[in-house]
Image (cartoon, rainbow, N blue to C red):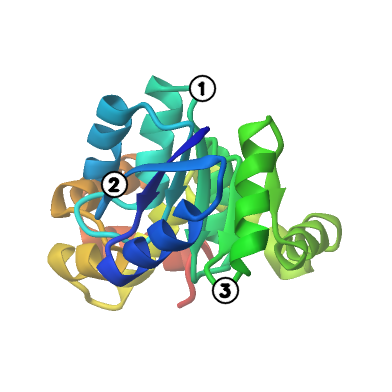
């Protein structure tokens, strides 16, 4: 039996997936969780073989939870199952250690097959996402190369640049936290890292320097 933990902040999604996947003869749905923190607790208590992980959730998002689970419970397989296919999320999830990245629109039988593949040591992402990743790696535009060079010069992560953009838009820490489904504490940590990397002391100076250096749009 493959023990599966389903993590999603929408009860309808977790209930539907539990019914669909629970009908597979070789699957056991050991539990559900509504956010990343509960996913970590449930992984420790229930010892699932595979965790189906949403990305956008309150308290702790799926990428952060995946990174923690893969660090503390490396034998547990994590598959990101989300409605989002932006490449930034794909890269973050795979970098965190996820073995799969699928969209919720996938057919239930294909999802079940994917879980079996990952459980037996495989890695799975959709063909569409793979094509986008390969295209970006092989044929980046001149602007993307310039942008990445400037970003890497300061060592800023993609998430830190996203936070910088929202600082530029005038959002508060609480508003940024709500937009990215993070805690305010996590946003404060990102901002502290930004200040340190840019060698500035406040959000206005950070935004000004980021625009001056071409890290974010003027």
Q: Residues within 10 Å of mark 3 (few under 14, many from 20)?
A: few
Q: Determine which residue is flagged by label 2.
A: 36
Q: Are marks 3 and 1 in contact (CB under 8 Å)?
A: no
Foreground: 144 or 179? 179
The residue positioned 52% from the left and 32% from the top of the image is 1
The residue positioned 42% from the left and 47% from the top of the image is 63
Q: Tell me if 65 is positioned left or right of 118 in this view.
A: left
Label 3 sits on a secondary structure element that is: loop
Q: Tell me if 68 is positioned left or right of 170 in this view.
A: right
Distance between mark 1 and mark 2 Cα atoms:
18 Å
Q: Do the residues labelled 2 and 3 touch (CB within 8 Å)?
A: no
Percent across and percent down for residue 53 are 42, 51
Percent across and percent down for residue 106 are 61, 68
> Quick one: which residue is furthest to the right in this view?
138
Q: Determine which residue is flagged by label 3.
A: 105
Label 2 sits on a secondary structure element that is: helix
Q: Determine which residue is flagged by label 1.
A: 75
Percent across and percent down for residue 176 are 24, 66
User: Is residue 40 something that shows in the picture?
Assistant: yes
Q: Residues within 10 Å of mark 2 (few under 14, many from 20)?
A: many
Q: State which quadrant residue 164 falls in.
A: bottom left
Q: State which quadrant residue 51 falls in.
A: top left
Q: Tell me if 66 is positioned left or right of 112 in this view.
A: left
Foreground: 146 or 93? 93
Specify which label sits upstream in the sequence, 2 or 3: 2
Specify which label sits upstream in the sequence, 3 or 1: 1
Residue mark closest to the camera, 1 vs 2 = 1
Percent across and percent down for residue 175 are 18, 71
The residue positioned 26% from the left and 49% from the top of the image is 60
Quadrant location, the C terminus: bottom left
User: Is residue 167 something that shows in the picture?
Assistant: no
């Amino acid at each position: 039996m493959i023990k599966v933990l389903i993590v999603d902040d929408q009860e309808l999604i977790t209930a539907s997936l539990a019914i669909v996947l629970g009908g597979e003869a070789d699957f056991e749905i050991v539990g559900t969780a509504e956010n990343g923190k509960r996913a970590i607790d449930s992984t420790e208590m229930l010892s699932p073989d595979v965790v189906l992980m949403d990305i956008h959730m309150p308290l702790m998002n799926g990428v952060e939870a995946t990174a923690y689970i893969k660090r503390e419970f490396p034998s547990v397989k994590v598959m990101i199952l989300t409605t989002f296919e932006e490449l930034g999320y794909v890269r973050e999830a795979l970098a965190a250690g996820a073995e799969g990245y699928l969209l919720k629109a996938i057919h239930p039988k294909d999802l079940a097959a994917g879980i079996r593949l990952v459980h037996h040591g495989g890695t799975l992402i959709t063909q569409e996402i793979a094509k986008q990743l390969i295209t970006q790696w092989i044929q980046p535009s001149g602007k993307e190369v310039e942008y990445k060079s400037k970003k890497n010069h300061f060592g800023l992560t993609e998430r830190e640049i996203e936070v910088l953009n929202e600082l530029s838009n005038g959002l508060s820490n609480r508003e940024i936290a709500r937009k990215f489904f993070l805690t305010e504490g996590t946003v404060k940590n990102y901002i502290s890292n930004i200040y340190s990397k840019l060698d500035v002391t406040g959000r206005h100076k950070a935004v000004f320097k980021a625009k001056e250096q071409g890290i974010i749009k003027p």
